[in-house]
Image: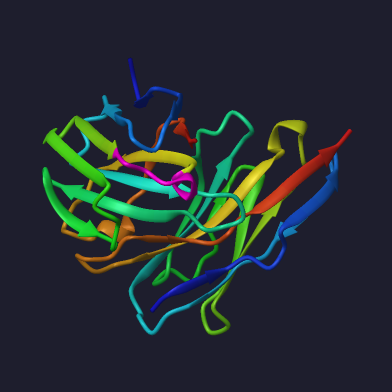
Amino acid sequence: AQTVTQSQPEMSVQEAETVTLSCTYDTSESDYYLFWYKQPPSRQMILVIRQEAYKQQNATENRFSVNFQKAAKSFSLKISDSQLGDAAMYFCAYGDGGSQGNLIFGKGTKLSVKP
Amino acid sequence: ETGVTQTPRHLVMGMTNKKSLKCEQHLGHNAMYWYKQSAKKPLELMFVYNFKEQTENNSVPSRFSPECPNSSHLFLHLHTLQPEDSALYLCASSQVSGGAIGANVLTFGAGSRLTVL
């Protein structure tokens, strides 16, 4: 069975600095998708970034980028120029590419941003 | 309204009560999901409806009963719950193409915070 591990329950970053959140996963599949979701204190979870496993190029979305290491099964999220609004729970998720797949989430990392 | 709307936002119920959670999506998606979010645990998928047909039921106790009357509405009927069922219940939707559910981006609602006394 696939698993997703986020080893950092909490992280803290100074405003305008860079922080990296780690995520590892375990799968025997070759076709899959990886996601980072953000859940601010208001609770509505939103997508931050999505990576297709068959693409070698790391996905980027403005200040958010990933370091996807397929062989190591690692999918870390880098947040550059951190802002106060980045404070949230961040969830890493794995999606199987098959018809019966669904998203498997990690336990999350709580990110605090210090002014 | 846009996005995924969940009601009620907060619900307190006794163990003998019957209540329902409602979810509505205005995105034209064809799949809807119920997730349970408990403190310090990963999100747990409870039910998936793909094209209104239930395709996943991850060993959820029968005291939780889903209903999907159409592709825009999803309900979670609750009865004789236990205190350990207290959690945030999240509804989500996605547009599934080619049958690859796991490839799709989920749009979540804000959740219904359930407390069972």
**Relative depth, front residue between A38 and A51:** A38
Q: Is residue A100 magenta?
A: no
- The answer to whether A112 appears left or right of A51 in the picture is right
Q: How is the image coloured?
A: rainbow
**Relative depth, front residue between A110 and A13:** A110
Q: Residue at x 51, y 50 (%)?
A: A49
Quadrant of residue A74 in the image? bottom right
Quarter of the figure that contains the N terminus of chain B: top left
Above or below, comparing residue A55 to residue B85 in the picture: below
Q: Residue at x 46, y 30 (%)?
A: B110
Please state the horizontal and vertical placement of residue B83, each as a whole percent of the image.
48, 45
Please state the horizontal and vertical placement of residue A22, each as a whole percent of the image.
67, 65
- The answer to whether B114 appears left or right of A109 in the picture is left
Q: Residue at x 55, y 58 (%)?
A: B41
Quadrant of residue B79 in the image? top left
Quadrant of residue A72 in the image? bottom right
**Relative depth, front residue between B115 and A52:** B115
**Relative depth, front residue between B105 and B60:** B60
Q: Given the current orientation, which residue lies at the most extreme top position? A: B1
Q: Which residues are magenta?
A: B79-85
Q: Is residue B84 visible?
A: yes
Q: Is residue A18 visible?
A: no
Q: Residue at x 22, y 44 (%)?
A: B65
